[in-house]
Image (tube, helix red, strand yellow):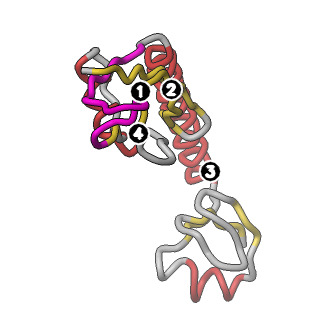
């Protein structure tokens, strides 16, 4: 019996895969639980259509993410902070501060996407990585200046 999996099944496969299974396993376990549907012509066509739609949606999201990454890369931000001797900041600059500065520059980025290993505690110029999407990363140039 050929089935199309509608959910991940341990030791068998993941969603959207077509598998040949024993008749009893398919008829008594997979089909009644809604974990799979028969791989007839109609269902296979529907699966292919869903895959094409998902691929098109992914391509559109990837293009938008690359455009955003390019925009982030060419938008430097300046953050003013009070500093003491040796250019040490009173406080620090964290990912929320960088996200706020990017938003003020017209680039909307979630603060959790900014991969700042530890807060910035000195005056200077820093390259901060930003994860726009899985596989699409950008670097934002952050100028921390005396304010």
Look at mark 2 in the image and give the residue it sits on. 126
Q: Quadrant of the C terminus?
A: top left
Look at mark 1 in the image and give the residue it sits on. 123
Judged from the image, the secondary structure of the residue bearing numbered disc 3 is helix
Which of label 4 and label 3 is nearer to you?
4
For the residues labelled 1 and 3, say whether their Cβ atoms are less than 8 Å apart: no
Judged from the image, the secondary structure of the residue bearing numbered disc 1 is loop
Depth check: give the residue in front, 1 or 142.
Answer: 142
Residue at the extreme front of the image, as rendered: 85
Dot 2 alpha-carbon crowd within 10 angstroms: few under 14, some 14 to 19, many 20 or more:
some
Which region shows up in magenta? 76-91
Which of label 2 and label 1 is nearer to you?
1
Among the 4 quarters of the image, the one containing residue 55: top right
Look at mark 3 in the image and give the residue it sits on. 44
Report the residue at 60% width, 42% height from top: 48
Report the residue at 66% width, 86% height from top: 25
Where residue 59 appears, as percent x and y from the top left, is 55, 27
Look at mark 4 in the image and give the residue it sits on. 121
- Residue 42: in sight, yes or no? yes
């Amino acid at each position: 019996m050929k089935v199309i999996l509608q959910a991940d099944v341990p030791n068998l496969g993941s969603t959207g895969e077509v598998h040949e299974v024993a008749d009893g396993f398919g008829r008594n376990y997979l089909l009644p639980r809604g974990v799979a549907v028969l791989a007839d012509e109609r269902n296979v066509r529907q699966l292919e259509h869903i895959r094409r739609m998902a691929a098109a949606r992914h391509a559109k999201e990837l293009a938008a993410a690359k455009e955003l990454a390019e925009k982030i890369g060419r938008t430097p931000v300046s953050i003013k902070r009070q500093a003491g001797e040796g250019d040490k900041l009173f406080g620090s600059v964290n990912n929320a501060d960088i996200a706020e500065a990017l938003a003020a520059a017209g680039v909307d980025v979630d603060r959790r996407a900014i991969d700042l290993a530890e807060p910035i505690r000195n005056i200077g110029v820093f390259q901060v990585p930003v994860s726009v999407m899985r596989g699409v990363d950008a670097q934002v140039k952050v100028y921390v200046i005396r304010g």
